[in-house]
Image (spheres, rainbow, N blue to C red):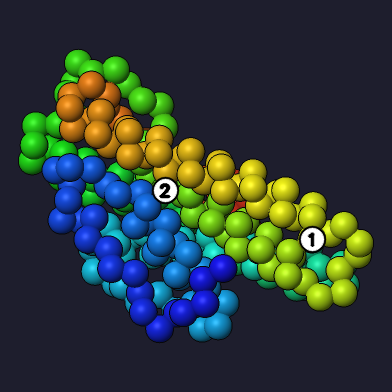
Amino acid sequence: MLTDVSRQPSIRFFRYYKRMIPASNILALYDHWTLQWHTDFSIANSNASLEAALESLHGANFELWHEEDTARAPRAGDAVIAQAKRNIDRINQRRNDQMEFCDVLLLQELASQQRPNPLAEMHSETPGMMLDRLSILTLKRYHTMEEIERPNAPAGHAQRNRERLAILERQRSDLALCLDQLWAATLRGERRFALYRQLKMYNDPTLNPALYSANAS
C-alpha cells in the first residue's frame, strides 16, 4: 500500500498524446489520490486538462463508494437513506460527465493528428469508459488491502482477501494494457472510438416524470 501522500506522482501523459497514454502513470495517480483522500478529500485540479478530468472522475467514484456505504448501513434511517440516494444521483451525474469529458479531450487531440481514421475498425469501449473502470478497480484494490490488514478479523479473512487482491491486480493490469493498446492502435489508424453520450434522464427535471410531475403539482 502507498504510504507517502506528500508527493504526487509526476505525470506528464498530457504531453505525450502522440505516443500513447501511459496507463501506469494514471494508475499511480489513482493510487495517490485514493490514499490522500482517505485523510483529506479535496479536488485540487480545476482546469480543463485531462489530468483534472481524471481527478474529478476518480473523485466522483471515491464519493460514490462511500455514499453507497452510507445508504447500506443497517441502522441508517429512512431520511439518511433518502439523502444518500439523492447524493448518489448527483455524484453519478458528475462521474458520467467527466468520463465523457476525458473522451472529448482525447478526440480533440486526435483530430489535430487526423485521427481517428474513419475507416478503422470501431472499438465499442472508449478510453473514458476504461479510465472509469480503472478508477473503480483502484478503489476495490485499496479497500481489499484494508481488509487484509484489518485487526481482529475472522479466521481466514486475510487469506480470502489476498486471493481477491490477486484477482484485482490482474484485472487492473490487464485493463491498463488494453488502454495503452487501444491508444496506440488509434494513433496508427488501425482502431477508432467515438464519443458516446450517456444522456442520463433521472437528474433532468424536463425528462424524468417523477420530477416534472412533482413540479407541476
Whether residue 61 appears in this view of the structure is: yes
User: Which quarter of the rendered picture does the C terminus lie within?
Assistant: bottom right
Q: Is residue 152 above or below residue 6?
A: above
Taking 45 as reference, is 124 left or right? Answer: right
Q: Secondary structure at mark 2?
A: helix
Q: Which mark is on residue 120?
A: none
Left or right of 190: which side holds 9? right
Q: Would you identify the image quadrant in which residue 46 lies? A: bottom left
Q: In the rendering, at what x and y percent does residue 43 appear?
A: 40, 75
Residue shown at 23%/21% (left/top)? 190
Residue reaching furthest to the right = 155
Q: Amino acid at mark 2?
A: Leu
The label nearer to you, 2 versus 1, is 1
Identify the residue position indicated by label 2 in the image.
131
**Label 1: how many residues lie within 10 Å, few (<14), some (14-19) or many (20+)?**
some
Q: CA distance from mark 2 to mark 1?
A: 29 Å
Whether residues under marks 2 and 1 lie with C-beta atoms below 8 angstroms apart, the answer is no
Measured from the top left, where is residue 9 in percent x and y?
A: 34, 69
**Where is residue 49, by image quadrant?**
bottom left
> Earlier along the polypeptide chain: callout 2 or callout 1?
2
Alpha-carbon neighbours of circle 2 within 10 Å: few (<14), some, or many (≥20)? Answer: many
Residue 198 in view, yes or no: no
Residue located beneath label 1 in the image: 158
- Residue at x-position 91% and y-position 62%: 155
